[in-house]
Image (cartoon, helix red, strand yellow):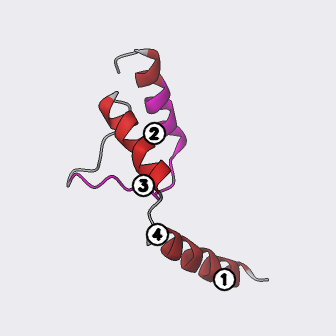
Amino acid sequence: MSYEEFKTNMNKYLTELAESPCTWEDAAMDWAEQKGLIKGDYSGHRMAKKFVTRGELATILARYSGINL
C-alpha cells in the first residue's frame, strides 16, 4: 500500500469515526472539562476526534498535577 492510499484510507476511517459519537467519550470529556483539564477551541468546539500533540498532552498533564502554566 502506498502512502497516498494509506492517507486516503485513514482520512476515510477518521471521518466515519468522527460521525459516530461514543457515550463513554462524552462522559470522559465532560469530566475533563469540569476538572479544567481540557477546553474547546476558540469557537467552543470540543474536537473529540482530533489528534493530541505532545504539547497539548503536556498541558493536560500539568493541569491534572495542579501546575499552573
Outermost residue, right side:
1
Which stretch is magenta? 44-61
Horizontal arrangement in the rendering, residue 17 relative to residue 41 (left or right): right
* Residue lying at the far left of the rendered structure: 43
Nearer-the-camera pick, 51 or 20: 20
Horizontal side of 38 relative to 12 (left or right) equals: left
Q: Which mark is residue 23?
A: none
Please tell me whether mark 1 or mark 3 is closer to you in this view.
Answer: 3
Category of crowding for the residue at label 2, using alpha-carbon neighbours closer than 10 angstroms: few (below 14), some (14–19), many (at least 20): few
Nearer the camera: disc 1 or disc 4: 4
Q: Quadrant of residue 5?
A: bottom right
Asked if residue 56 is among those painted magenta in the image, a careful observer would answer yes
Q: Which residue is mark 2?
A: 56
Q: Nearer the viewer, mark 2 or mark 1?
A: 2
Real-space Cα separation, disc 1 to disc 4, in angstroms: 25 Å
Q: x%, y% of residue 33?
A: 33, 36
Residues under labels 1 and 3: Cα distance? 25 Å
Seen in the picture, residue 64 relative to 33 is either above or below; the reply is above
**Secondary element at tag 4:** loop
Distance CA(mark 2)–CA(mark 1): 27 Å
Contact, CB < 8 Å: mark 4 with mark 3?
Answer: no
**Contact flag, marks 2 and 1 (Cβ < 8 Å):** no
Three-letter code, disc 1 = Glu
Residue depicted at 45% across the width and 22% down the height? 64
Rounded to the nearest whole Å, what is the CA distance between mark 2 and mark 3?
13 Å
Q: Which mark is residue 4?
A: 1
Label 4 or label 3, whichever lies nearer to me, is 4
Q: Of discs 2 and 3, which sits in the foreground?
A: 3
Using the image, tell me which numbered label, if any, was put on residue 20: 4
Label 2 vs 4, first from the N-terminus: 4
Q: Residues within 10 Å of mark 4 (few under 14, many from 20)?
A: few
At label 4, the amino acid type is Ser
